[in-house]
Image: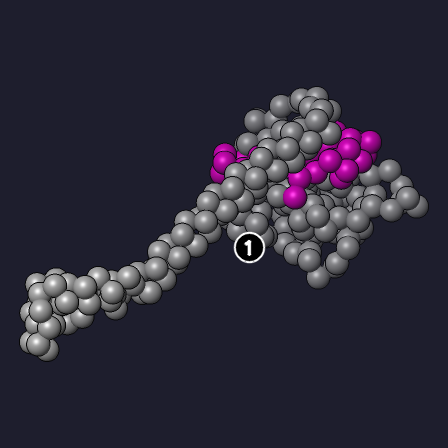
Amino acid sequence: MVFFFTGRDPRYLMYMGADKEENEHLIRWGWPEDVWFHVDKHSSAHVYIRLLEGQTTLDDIPEEVIEDCAQMTKLNSIEGCKLNDVQIVYTMWSNLKKTGDMNTGQVGFHNRSGCRFTQVKRRRNEITNLLNKTKREEFPDLQQLREARDRAEIQVRKKVAAVQRLGDKAQRLESDKEKDIKNYTGVFEDEKMQSNSVILEKLKLTGKSDVQACRDMEDDFM
């Protein structure tokens, strides 16, 4: 079972696992655009938000969304909920590291430098009450949702690649056209173009008869 919440910015999907077993599923089938929150150095719920389309880093998250997640994380920590000045760690889902020797629901990090921290001085009931009012329980098939997301991403990439190929082809055709134009630029220059009558007159000035001049024109042409 997964709990879903709507925070002060309803554009963001916020959710957490109901227990450590569900946390295992969330760790395994999270999305690359998911951000994970946890009370640092204490047990707590695993709270997630999903970045919006076009967002890729922790810097893209508004401060009030971070605060909502931090408050919810503190609230759902047996030890953390009783303390002031609780530190919350958050990082991208892709930075979570799970190894076979870890307990159920336990997780580490690939790179500690990829983590951010925020301090919760005290619980703000106006925030946690608002979040809990929006709480809903669902039983999503996390694996199916992740696989559907990956298939959709592959289709988008294929379409982008196809558009890129068409653009490259059009660019090559335009380049070839420009080359052809350059190659034939000198062929039809005005000073090099002469009518047959002008050429005939020039040949007649050399003393050749009309018949001989015409024959010379034909020889030049051939």
* Residue 156 image point, x, y percent: 55, 38
Furthest residue toward bottom: 206
Q: What range is drawn magenta here? A: 7-32
Mark 1 Cα shell of 10 Å, populated few (<14), some (14-19), many (≥20) = few
Residue shown at 65% from the left, 29% from the top: 148
Note whether 185 is above or below 11 in the view shown. Answer: below
| The one of 155 and 186 positioned closer to us in this rendering | 186
177 left or right of 22 in image: left
Q: Secondary structure at mark 1?
A: helix
In the drawing, does residue 197 fall left or right of residue 40?
Answer: left
Is 101 colored magenta in this rendering? no
Q: Quadrant of the N terminus?
A: top right
Name which residue type carries label 1.
Answer: Asp
Q: Quadrant of the C terminus?
A: bottom left
Examine the rendering and report whether any part of residue 181 can be seen. Answer: yes
Viewer can see residue 2: no
Query: x, y percentage for residue 86?
Result: 69, 51
Position of residue 135 in the picture relative to residue 82 (left or right): left
**Looking at the image, which residue is at 55% across and 32% down?**
6
Please tell me which residue lies in front, 71 or 212: 212
Q: Is residue 22 above or below residue 72?
A: above
Nearer the observer, 91 or 37:
91
Q: Quadrant of residue 106?
A: top right
- Where residue 79 appears, x then y in whole percent? 78, 43
Q: Can you identify the residue that label 1 sits on? A: 59
Q: Residue 112: where, in percent of width, then height?
A: 74, 59
Q: Is residue 22 above or below residue 101?
A: above
| Quarter residue 190 falls in | bottom left
> Which residue sits at x=18%, y=70%?
192
Q: Residue at x 14, y 67 (%)?
A: 212
Residues 185 and 97: in front is 185
